[in-house]
């Protein structure tokens, strides 16, 4: 089993319930054990501004899947929950990204590990720092990556009750 970090996002429908459902389904997979789940955060859209705010969360899992198999399981999960392909960075019912996997790096047409924009995005770093502040990604700890972001970007990520 290897540790991996996943990010979840949604801005259509009941976003919180959709993310909770995605995490629950992942936890039911024989090859995945969910070990930690962050709080849920409301975040402004990134990439395409003219859309509703997102709800985001992160989870740490232990998995026997390869990085490619974990990505495939996440994409199958998105489809099973009703996601349809649309505008890049646009509105979505559910998005599940593989951010990082212990001891693994990839740079292929279908998978980059660690996620290439992970260290630039407060909507990922804030929840990830909550559950794995000392994970080392790209030569620095998650908490250090988060500290490097502009305060305005960090402050725009609002914890939900």
Image (tube, rainbow, N blue to C red):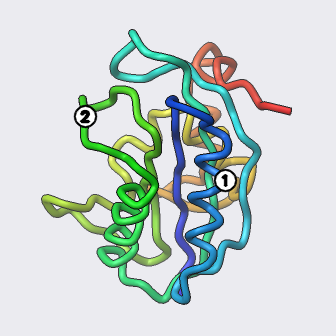
Against 127, residue 14 (above or below) is above
Disc 2 crowd rating (10 Å Cα; few below 14, some 14-19, many 20+) is: few
In front of the other: 55 or 35: 55
Image location (x, y in percent) of residue 116: 33, 47
- Judge from the rendering whether residue 69 lies leftward or rightward of residue 58; answer left or right: left
Quadrant containing the N terminus in the rendered view: bottom right
In front of the other: 132 or 17: 17
Residue at horizontal 46 percent and vertical 45 percent from the top: 94
Against 3, residue 59 (above or below) is above
Picture quarter containing residue 147? top right
How many marks on residues?
2
In front of the other: 12 or 41: 12
What residue does disc 2 label?
86
Image location (x, y in percent) of residue 55: 61, 33
Q: Secondary structure at mark 2?
A: loop
View extreme (top): residue: 50
In front of the other: 138 or 45: 45
Against 102, residue 127 (above or below) is above
What residue does disc 1 label?
20
Picture quarter containing residue 148? top right
Picture quarter containing residue 103? bottom left
Image location (x, y in percent) of residue 126: 66, 38
Residue at horizontal 41 percent and vertical 61 percent from the top: 80
């Amino acid at each position: 089993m290897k540790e991996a970090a996943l990010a979840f996002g949604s801005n259509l429908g009941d976003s919180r319930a959709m993310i909770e459902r995605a995490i629950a389904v992942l936890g039911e997979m024989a090859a995945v054990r969910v070990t930690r789940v962050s709080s849920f955060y409301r975040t402004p859209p990134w990439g395409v501004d003219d859309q509703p705010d997102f709800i985001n969360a992160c989870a740490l899992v232990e998995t026997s899947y390869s990085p490619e198999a974990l990505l495939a399981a996440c994409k199958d999960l998105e489809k099973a929950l009703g996601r349809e392909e649309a505008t890049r960075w646009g509105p979505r019912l559910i998005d599940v990204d593989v951010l990082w996997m212990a001891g693994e790096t990839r740079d292929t047409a279908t998978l980059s590990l660690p996620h290439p924009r992970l260290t630039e995005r407060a909507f990922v770093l804030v929840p990830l720092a909550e559950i794995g502040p000392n994970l080392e990604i790209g030569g620095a700890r998650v908490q250090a990556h988060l500290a490097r972001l502009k305060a305005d970007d960090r402050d725009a990520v609002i914890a939900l009750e």
